[in-house]
């Protein structure tokens, strides 16, 4: 696929920088039901705003959850999100 992990992360970083002052703001914004976990629909919304192609959004959302979900409960909590973001230059 033309969308590499790097490109997707770059797009997400751009979104974070342009829209949020802190990654936690982004996390809370996308966690619509405020249960402290981002699920697949939450990631799809994030990816939509990050201008990721609709064709691959579902796949990327699944991929991101699998990548970020350290405790393997199928969703991504703030600790997991922060760790994943910490691997990038975004602080
Ligand atoms: Ca949630
Ligand atoms: Ca998890």
Image (cartoon, rainbow, N blue to C red):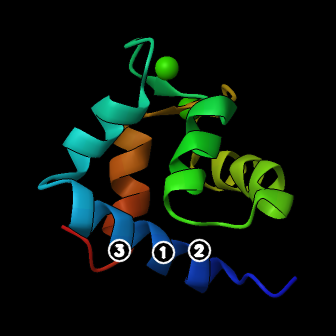
- Tell me the distance, in whole angstroms, between the alpha carbons under discs 2 and 3: 10 Å
**Res. 41 mark:** none
Image vertical order of residue 49 relative to residue 5, above or below = above
Q: Earlier in the sequence, mark 2 or mark 3?
A: 2
**Circle 2 sits on which residue?**
8
**Circle 1 sits on which residue?**
11
Q: Is label 3's Cβ within 8 Å of ligand 1?
A: no
- Report crowding for label 1: few under 14, some 14 to 19, many 20 or more residues within 10 A (C-alpha): some
In depth, the one of 24 and 48 nearer the eye is: 48
Image vertical order of residue 67 relative to residue 72, above or below = below
- Report crowding for label 3: few under 14, some 14 to 19, many 20 or more residues within 10 A (C-alpha): some
- Tell me the distance, in whole angstroms, between the alpha carbons under discs 1 and 2: 5 Å
The image shows residue 2 at horizontal and vertical percentages of 81, 88
Q: Would residue 91 appear left or right of 13 to someone viewing this image?
A: left
The image shows residue 36 at horizontal and vertical percentages of 38, 20
Choose top left, top right, bottom left or bottom right for residue 87: bottom left
- Which residue is pictured at 42% across the width and 34% down the height? 30
- Tell me the distance, in whole angstroms, between the alpha carbons under discs 1 and 3: 5 Å
Instruction: Name the element at disc 3.
Output: helix
In depth, the one of 62 and 16 nearer the eye is: 16
């Amino acid at each position: 696929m033309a969308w590499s992990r790097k490109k997707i992360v770059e797009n997400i970083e751009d979104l974070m920088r342009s829209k949020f002052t802190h990654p936690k703001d982004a996390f809370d914004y996308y966690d619509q039901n405020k249960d402290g976990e981002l699920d697949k629909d939450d990631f799809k919304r994030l990816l939509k705003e990050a201008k990721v192609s609709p064709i691959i959004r579902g796949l990327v959302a699944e991929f991101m959850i699998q990548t970020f979900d350290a405790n393997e409960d199928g969703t991504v909590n703030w600790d997991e999100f922060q760790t994943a973001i910490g691997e990038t230059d975004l602080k």
